[in-house]
Amino acid sequence: MPPPPAPRKTTGRPARISLEEIIRTARGIVSQDGVDRLTMRRLATEIGSTPMALYHHVRDKEELLLLLLDDYAARTLRRPDPPPTDPRDRVLTAATAIHEVLAACPWIVEVLTADDLMSTSALWFVEQIVAGLTESGLSLDEAVHGYRTIWYYTAGEIVVRAASARRRSADARPTYRDQIFADLDPADLPRLAEAAPRWAPLTAQDTYERGLRALLNGLLHDR
Amino acid sequence: MPPPPAPRKTTGRPARISLEEIIRTARGIVSQDGVDRLTMRRLATEIGSTPMALYHHVRDKEELLLLLLDDYAARTLRRPDPPPTDPRDRVLTAATAIHEVLAACPWIVEVLTADDLMSTSALWFVEQIVAGLTESGLSLDEAVHGYRTIWYYTAGEIVVRAASARRRSADARPTYRDQIFADLDPADLPRLAEAAPRWAPLTAQDTYERGLRALLNGLLHDR
DNA sequence: GTAAGTTTTTATACATGTAAGAAAACTAGC
DNA sequence: GCTAGTTTTCTTACATGTATAAAAACTTAC
């Protein structure tokens, strides 16, 4: 039976490591040697503990990475000053800010799929997006859907582009997809065959904002 | 020096297993026990070989999954008959078909990030999208960008939704994000606080097509 | 036949995430 | 002091992907 109204402080073995220390150390490893070098063993060693001790502060490695993303977003995201007054611009500015931070931080890809609301530090930006959409005439429910549509687009852009960038660098030999793309039959797939030589440069371009503007125009179509 | 104009057949040790057999067996495992149970060891055992033998037919497990996705797409994607004549409908139909197949196949999430052009079997659908966009007045380059925007949105939707579905099922205990979401300060984030109770049901809705239509409207804004 | 070359398969080994349970280090009640 | 309870840490063990290098099973040139 737990002591009901006791002035208890803490019970049990005192913690030797803290979540804060874990995240700080992990950040150091990632920023120094890249996310690939972040292993639970190394992290434990650098902290002076054991791998399994980490698991009392973190559910699994994915949660650790999520916390790392939160940490990163918290220290990187900057609210626009002054915030735009035009509702449409509020949406654009907030979404672009989120995208910019994520794009600069390629290792998050493995985590981006983990949840739909990014970091708690990003909540303010989500608010801006939803607010901008409602002020443009959408109902609250429509605005939430609109936000999610924007988030899908943003997450997809990051994930897909980061992954194909990784591919390109990691591996010189062409995938069988490249091959197939090179051998397109113009009779079957005329547009793709025509676009094929320009495909690589085209897809290398950063068109996030262009797409975002189009999407926003569509969302606010008749308002 | 290689024999220049020799009529050689094949040299070296004859293969005991084929890529086709690998994929077929892997498909069986996945469809029967889920993608989590697909391990290189089990696959090798079921084929009657050794894990490392697989690596002569497949670069790594990710490539195996990609091939599996290709295989799945090839046998699942069905071209609309008759294809819509309206360009806008061609885009909608093709994108929706791709999305439908991917959404029904949750395990692809781990692979979706791997490349921007999905399966070779999907090329025809990509062609439809690009064609529909050009016929609506976009230049070829604009159409390719438009296709990519649609693909980002589609991939993002699949990845994010599949991941959050996985979360919900795998784990009853709420994440700290849920917690934060429950404690939103209405003074700071009024819209989110207002939407909070409805957030879960709202995000559970399938709004892919709605978002797609908005996006398409935006892409074809002034055409 | 034999030797050389080529391709596929096998054996062995390692790094990693993490499950399971024992041990340690504390507090509260006696 | 001691005992019970609680929380954190540590030990051990396992499944997995895959690197490395050796062996096997062929073909071709002589």
Image (cartoon, coloured by chain):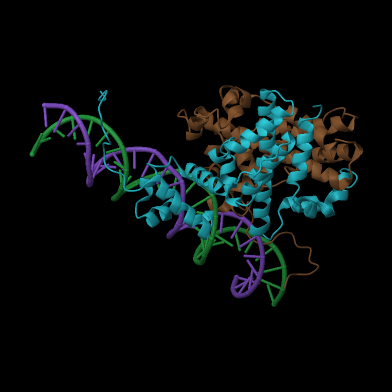
Chain colours: A brown, B cyan, C green, D purple
Residue B54, above or below B11? below
> With A66 as the anchor, is A180 left or right in this view?
left
Q: Nearer the viewer, residue B111 or A176?
A: A176
Q: Give the number of marks.
A: 0
Q: Position of residue A213 (x, y in %)?
A: 78, 30
**Which residue lies at the image location 42% right of the left edge and 53% below the top edge?**
B43
List the single residue furthest toward the front: B82
Q: Quadrant of residue B131?
A: top right
Task: Name the residue nearer the viewer: D24 or A78.
Answer: D24
- Tell me if residue A121 can be seen: no
Quadrant containing the N terminus of chain A is: bottom right
Q: Nearer the viewer, residue D3 or A173?
A: A173
Residue A46 makes an appearance in the image? yes
A95 lies left or right of B77: right
Which residue corresponds to the image point at 59% horizontal and 48% vertical from the top-left?
Answer: A61
Question: Is B39 on the left or on the right of B76, as rendered?
Answer: left
Pick the quarter of the image with the C terminus of chain A: top right
Q: Position of residue B111 (x, y in %)?
A: 56, 43
